[in-house]
């Protein structure tokens, strides 16, 4: 059960919450999910009217990620070595009527203002690797990402690509909202 929930939060960090209808503002976050058995290939892209540094300050804020992304219960940096950090997170979600709590530890390599690479060290997925890139385009920042999750076989069977896409979109909408909130005077 824990493996199924972790798929919902997908990308940088992310793990679990049920899919529901999204506000119209979320639809400009492009998400493509391809499923093959228990593996999910996920790509996403969105823009935010903020500088690369303003976007980076939220996307790389693992100490406060639980206050930013609604499905993350706790997020803490357990070690730091230059631009390499290890992050432990606990999150929650639902798979139908079942409530699930999920733990995971990720190694994250930060290339400031350009790239975040995340690799699952231990946790409830078989594998998870994501790369998020930031590109300045004048007054906006384009955020793109790609990654692959591999769940336990039964969890992969229970989740659809549409559910994973909806949660990925929600996660990045919450991150974008926080970027804009911090930018506001």
Image: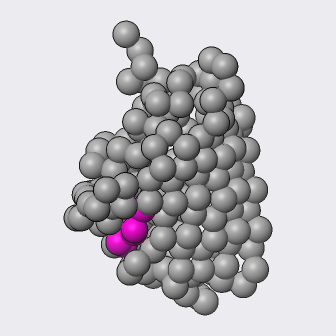
Q: Which residues are drawn in magenta?
A: 104-108
The residue positioned 45% from the left and 28% from the top of the image is: 54
Q: Quick check: is 176 in the magenta stretch?
A: no
State the scheme by which the image is colored. Answer: one colour
Q: Is residue 92 visible?
A: no
Residue 11 rendering spot, x and y as whole percentages: 55, 58
Outermost residue on the front side: it is 82
Q: Quick check: is 106 in the magenta stretch?
A: yes
Judge left or right: residue 30 versus residue 124.
right
Residue 63 rendering spot, x and y as whole percentages: 27, 49
Residue 61 rendering spot, x and y as whole percentages: 35, 44
Quadrant (top left/top right/bottom left/bottom right) for the N terminus: bottom left
Q: Main secondary structure of the magenta part?
A: strand
Quadrant (top left/top right/bottom left/bottom right) for the C terminus: top left
Q: Is residue 100 above or below residue 49?
A: below
Q: Which of these two is toward me, 96 or 135?
A: 135
Judge left or right: residue 87 versus residue 138.
left
The residue positioned 22% from the left and 64% from the top of the image is: 78
Q: Is residue 70 above or below residue 88?
A: above
The residue positioned 28% from the left and 62% from the top of the image is: 81
Residue 175 rendering spot, x and y as whole percentages: 48, 39
């Amino acid at each position: 059960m824990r493996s199924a929930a972790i798929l919902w939060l997908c990308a940088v960090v992310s793990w679990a919450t049920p899919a529901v209808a999204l506000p119209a503002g979320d639809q400009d976050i492009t998400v493509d999910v391809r499923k093959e058995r228990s593996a999910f290939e996920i790509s996403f892209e969105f823009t935010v009217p903020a500088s690369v540094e303003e976007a980076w300050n939220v996307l790389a804020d693992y100490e406060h990620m639980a206050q930013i992304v609604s499905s993350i219960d706790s997020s803490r940096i357990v070690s730091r070595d230059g631009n390499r950090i290890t992050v432990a997170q606990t999150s929650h979600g639902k798979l139908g009527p079942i409530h699930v709590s999920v733990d995971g530890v990720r190694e994250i390599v930060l290339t400031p203002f350009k790239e975040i690479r995340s690799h699952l060290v231990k946790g409830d997925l078989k594998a998870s690797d994501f790369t998020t890139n930031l590109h300045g385009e004048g007054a906006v920042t384009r955020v793109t990402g790609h990654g692959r999750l591999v769940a336990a076989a039964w969890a992969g069977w229970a989740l659809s690509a549409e559910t994973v896409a909806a949660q990925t979109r929600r996660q990045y909408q919450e991150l974008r909202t926080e970027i804009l909130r911090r930018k506001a005077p």
